[in-house]
Amino acid sequence: MGSSAAVLLCVVLSLVAAAPQPRFITMEVLKGTAPSTPRKLIGFARGFCPVPFDEMREMGKMGSKCRGQEIPKPQCCAAVKDFACPYSDLVDELTNGCNVELLDKAQTFCSVPIGYFGFCGDSEFGISCPPR
């Protein structure tokens, strides 16, 4: 009887480990509070992020849905989520500069102030992205 309980426990734990994990673009990233500005100045924003955000056509689409708004509208936040979620792992890694690159390019394309995308969080953690 003890061995069947151990087998059942192993099966349950393997199912939990294999379940898709929720992904987020955190509020710190969205508000532009991490990493700090000095990191950008010493080069973390350039050369470390493998994604050329400014060369992507989708960035222009996001810009057209968000351009110059004072408060993010649902279509803007949906566009941000659609654009950024495929890169959530890279964007939430604070040492590669992708978060700085993404926010800098998005703010430029959309003509919005720093911290603007912090209003797009759809959970307490930030923007929730679909599991992979």
Image: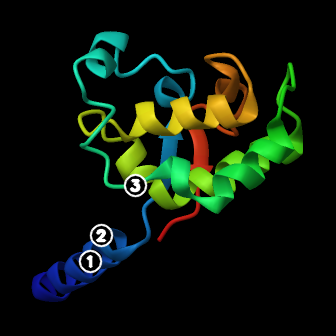
| Residue with the mark numbered 1 | 14
- Tell me the quarter of the picture where residue 47 sits: top left
Residue 85 relative to residue 50: left or right: right
- Tell me the quarter of the picture where residue 11 sits: bottom left
Where disc 3 sits, the SS reads: loop
Q: Where is residue 117 in the image (x, y as percent from the top left)?
A: 67, 29
68 is higher (above) or lower (below) than 21: above
Dot in front, 3 or 1: 3
Where disc 2 sits, the SS reads: helix
Which residue is depicted at the point 38% across and 41% down?
A: 98
Q: Residues within 10 Å of mark 3 (few under 14, many from 20)?
A: some
For badge 2, the amino acid type reads Ala
For badge 3, the amino acid type reads Val
Which residue is depicted at the point 68% across and 46% down?
A: 80
Residue 78 shows in this picture? yes
Res 85 label: none
Residue 125 shows in this picture? no
Q: How far apart are marks 2 and 1 (CA)?
A: 5 Å
| Residue with the mark numbered 3 | 51
| Residue with the mark numbered 2 | 17
Q: In which quarter of the image is the N terminus?
A: bottom left
Q: Of the residues under marks 3 and 1, which one precedes in the sequence?
A: 1
Q: Position of residue 109 (x, y in %)?
A: 69, 37
Q: 105 and 11: which one is in front?
A: 105
Q: Where is residue 82 in the image (x, y as percent from the top left)?
A: 67, 57
Q: How crowded is mark 1: few (under 14 residues within 10 Å), some or many (20 or more)?
A: few
For the residues labelled 2 and 1, say whether their Cβ atoms are less than 8 Å apart: yes
Where disc 1 sits, the SS reads: helix
26 is higher (above) or lower (below) than 86: above
Q: Kindly give the residue lying farthest to the left in the view shown.
A: 3
Counting labels gives: 3
